[in-house]
Amino acid sequence: MPKECILRLYILGSNAASELALANLRDIIAKETKTIFKLEVIDIRKNPQLAENDKIIAVPTLIRKLPKPIRKIIGDLSDIEKVLLGLDIILQNGK
C-alpha cells in the first residue's frame, strides 16, 4: 500500500520564487509513484493565521505535515536532492 504524505507550501503571491517552488514540487510529486500526496498551497497574504500557526519565517516554505515528524524546507525547491531528503522520499529510479 502506498504511503501518504500531506504537504503545505507557503508562498507570497505569484512571484518568481513562489512559482518556481510550486513547479519544482509538482515535478517531484509527478515522478514519485510510491507515495500519495495531498498538497495545500497557502498564500500567506490570504491566510496569515495559518502561516503564524506553522511558524513560517520565510517563503517559499514547504512543510511535510504527515507522516510525522513535521519537516520544513525553505527556498525554491530547486535542489531536488535536498527536497527528497527533507521529505524522506526515494524516487523509483533510485535518485
Image (spheres, rainbow, N blue to C red):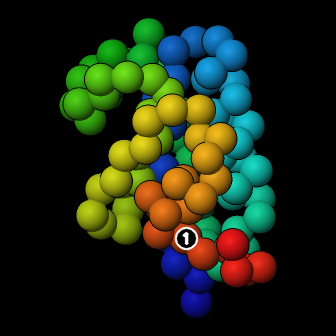
Number of on-image labels: 1
Residue that badge 1 annotates = 89
- In this picture, residue 44 sits left or right of residue 16: left
Percent position (x, y) of residue 92?
A: 73, 80
- In this picture, residue 31 sits left or right of residue 21: right
User: Which residue is most to the bottom?
Assistant: 1
**Residue drawn at the location 51% of the way across and 32% of the way down:** 75
**Residue drawn at the location 37% of the way across and 46% of the way down:** 72
Work out whether residue 42 can be spotted. Answer: no
Work out whether residue 16 can be spotted. Answer: yes
- In this picture, residue 70 sits left or right of residue 74: left
| Helix, strand or loop under label 1 | loop
> Circle 1: is it few (<14), some (14-19), or many (20+) Cα within 10 Å?
some
Q: Nearer the viewer, residue 28 or 67?
A: 28
Q: Is residue 11 above or below residue 34?
A: above
Mark 1 is on which residue type? Answer: Ile
For the N terminus, the quadrant is bottom right
* Quadrant in which residue 95 is drawn: bottom right
- In this picture, residue 91 sits left or right of residue 52: right
**Residue drawn at the location 59% of the way across and 32% of the way down:** 76
* Quadrant in which residue 56 is drawn: top left
Percent position (x, y) of residue 79?
A: 61, 47
Percent position (x, y) of residue 50?
A: 31, 28
Q: Is residue 67 above or below residue 64?
A: below
Q: Nearer the viewer, residue 14 or 81?
A: 81
Q: Nearer the viewer, residue 41 or 24?
A: 24
Q: Is residue 24 above or below residue 21?
A: below
* Quadrant in which residue 74 is drawn: top left
**Residue drawn at the location 59% of the way across and 41% of the way down:** 77
Percent position (x, y) of residue 17?
A: 62, 21
